[in-house]
Image (spheres, rainbow, N blue to C red):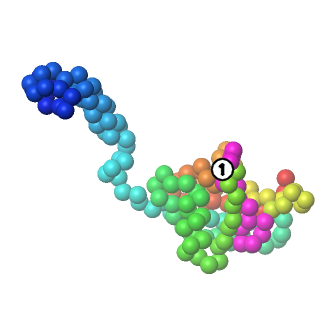
């Protein structure tokens, strides 16, 4: 690496700082190549349904359609739905250890006295209903899933 001008080195003299910068630049370039679609992929909307169910009352479920960006979290989709549909509201609190905790949906909140809460379930594309091992702040919906917000007891 002779001939590189640098404020720390004389012209046409080997420069150790320039030599150290080359591997760092190559590593950064390689990282950009390894990130799948990070710079070129569009954030296409992923359609999902949010189904609000009250298991404690004999009321029909209410379904709302929304979307999440590809690889986006459920919390973002719920906020988008609330911003676009006056018939859907929700609140959550931030737990410093576990992340967002769903408190209420459409004015109905769970409480410790009655042992009630909002359970997160997912009806997957293949028809299975699962209970994710993460909450609204970490769950990444897939296209056409039905996200079930189920008011129930523990």
Farthest bottom residue in view: 86
Residue 86 in view in this figure: yes
Residue 68 horizontal side relative to residue 27, left or right? right
Farthest right residue in view: 113
Where does residue 14 sit, x and y in percent of width and height? 15, 21
**Where on the picture, by quarter, is residue 122?**
bottom right
Residue 52 in view in this figure: no
Where does residue 59 sit, x and y in percent of width and height? 78, 73
Where does residue 78 sit, x and y in percent of width and height? 60, 64
Magenta stretch: dominant SS?
A: strand
* Residue with the mark numbered 1: 99
Query: Which of 124 and 139 lies nearest the eye of the viewer?
Result: 139
The magenta stretch is 96-109
Where does residue 84 sit, x and y in percent of width and height? 55, 75
The residue sitting at 13% across, 31% down in the picture is: 5
Q: What is the secondary structure assignment of the residue under circle 1?
A: strand
**Image quadrant where one finds the N terminus:** top left
**Where on the picture, by quarter, is residue 116?**
bottom right
The residue sitting at 85% across, 53% down in the picture is: 154
The residue sitting at 63% across, 59% down in the picture is: 147
Vertical comparison of 131 with 58: above or below: above
The residue sitting at 46% across, 55% down in the picture is: 70
Residue 2 horizontal side relative to residue 137, left or right? left
* Picture mark count: 1
Residue 1 horizontal side relative to residue 40, left or right? left
Vertical comparison of 87 with 53: above or below: below
Query: Which of 153 and 122 lies nearest the eye of the viewer?
Result: 153
Q: Is residue 103 magenta?
A: yes
Vertical comparison of 128 with 148: above or below: above
Q: Residues within 10 Å of mark 1 (few under 14, many from 20)?
A: some
Vertical comparison of 40 with 63: above or below: above
């Amino acid at each position: 690496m002779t001939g590189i001008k640098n404020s720390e080195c004389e012209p046409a003299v080997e420069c150790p700082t320039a030599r150290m910068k080359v591997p760092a630049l190559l590593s950064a370039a390689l990282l950009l190549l390894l990130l799948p679609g990070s710079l070129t992929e569009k954030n296409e909307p992923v359609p999902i349904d949010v189904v609000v169910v009250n298991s404690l009352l004999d009321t029909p479920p209410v379904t709302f359609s929304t979307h999440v960006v590809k690889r986006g979290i459920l919390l973002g989709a719920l906020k988008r739905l609330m911003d676009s549909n006056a018939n859907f509201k929700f609140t959550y609190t931030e737990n410093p250890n576990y992340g967002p905790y769903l408190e209420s949906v459409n004015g109905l909140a769970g409480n410790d006295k009655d042992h009630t809460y909002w359970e997160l379930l997912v009806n997957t594309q293949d028809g299975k209903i699962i209970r994710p091992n993460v909450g609204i702040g970490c769950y990444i919906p897939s296209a056409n899933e039905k996200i079930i917000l189920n008011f129930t007891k523990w």
